[in-house]
Amino acid sequence: MPFATSAAVRRLLPGAFLILTVTTLGCGERHHVAHAVWTLFDIQAALQKGGNVAAGPTLGAGMPASAILTTQPDGTDTLNVVPTFAEGAPAAFVTTELWIDYDQVWLEPGYVQLDSANPVHRLAYPDGRNSPLIIDVGPDSTFYSPFWQLSTALVGPQSDVDHYRSSRALRDAGVPIAPFVPHACPLRPPNVLGASPGQHPVEPTWKTELDDLPAGDAWLNGEKLGLFDLGPNVFSADANGVVEALPFFIFVAADATGAVGPCPMAWRVAGVGPLFSGRAADVGVDAATGWPQPHFGAFWRVYLAVLPAGAGAFAAADHPATNPAGVDLLDYQGRVALDAKCFDQPDFPTGCTWLDSQARIEAILGARNLLATEITGTCPLVFYNKKPVKR
């Protein structure tokens, strides 16, 4: 059976993807609804009402805010960790922002307060916490972006770390300003914290804990907000400050009735470069832990990857007789193969044609079966190649 055509899939979109509301990653919409940008402030407000976020053409009813945040017994809300594949290996991500019908997201200005001309010398509180960033654009603005073109502000030693609370105050005081590197720092309510404990298969499966996202604060015109610091090397932007969106693939297929919907049990696949760019994964290694540091992954455009008949995702529970020696079946949970019949063959898993990397998806499915959606979002990787990401 030939692959579904782009036109056929688009005709089925309005009703076909309602099921995605409980299974997809939660990265935005391009349809114009009440919130064109969903920040963690909006997502938390929806969570408290038991509501959904980001309704639009691909996610007809939206998705529950509880797919992104979980309320803990102490009243804090924590980020949910969602499994994926990247470069043929298990990985995972969290979601901090969603965009609806945004073709571009830009860098916004921000300032790091220094007590000397050396960027290492960040102004800090007595307990060692870094002084807040100073920013101009907040979560209520349609221009909000978690991607900041930072500059350093040489404020010198301060007995009051919170002396400067706006960029205007810095300018009025004549504080020396110098260019610095861009950072990804999603804003958050003060009671939104890092990943939920025990929710990610990395913990029971590979017996290791995720590294929590570094948390801090920012001043916005005298109002203190929380933030997560994802670091300086997790996205790219062009000379005009437009942030590059990499592809995130969600597998879809037609069922026996011809209706198109998500491939059951299939994990998503995170790309490493623009579609069909051939870009290799740029991944550093933390010297102290040996954990990976992907230099990409903070900003995504979701693509629907249309599967041919017979493709499917591996679920160990559905194939109890499949137990090849020396193979950890959990490495293949949720991994999509071009022909699911290979799951029961004696040469599993080497006999399967896996769709578990950007390059394989592009080569096997082709451009006509990769459909860009209106969904974009900040979904940083917290687990990569079966190891926690170090920030």
Image (tube, helix red, strand yellow):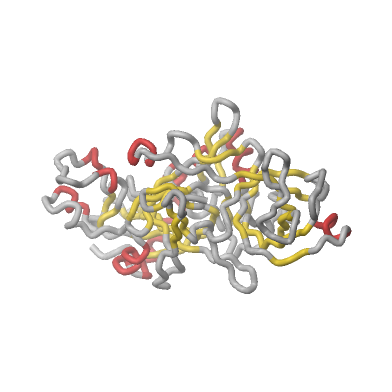
Q: Quadrant of residue 179?
A: bottom right
Q: Position of residue 222 (x, y in %)?
A: 81, 46
Judged left or right of residue 262, residue 189 is right
Tell me the residue at 46%/58% (across/down).
294
Q: Position of residue 101 (x, y in %)?
A: 58, 59
**Residue situated in front as seen by the camera: 243 or 328:** 328
Tell me the residue at 80%/52% (across/down).
166
Tell me the residue at 73%/55% (across/down).
114
The number of numbered badges drawn on the structure is 0
Relative height, residue 220 to residue 51 (above, below): below
**Residue situated in front as seen by the camera: 270 or 373:** 270
Q: Quadrant of residue 2?
A: bottom left
Q: Quadrant of residue 355?
A: bottom left
Q: Position of residue 94 (x, y in %)?
A: 50, 47
> Which image quarter holds the N terminus?
bottom left
Q: Position of residue 293 (x, y in %)?
A: 47, 56
Residue lying farthest to the right in this orientation: 172
Tell me the residue at 28%/43% (across/down).
330
* Residue 79 in sight from this viewpoint: yes
Judged left or right of residue 96, residue 257 is left
**Residue situated in front as seen by the camera: 286 or 384:** 286
Residue lying farthest to the top in this orientation: 73
Judged left or right of residue 360, residue 113 is right
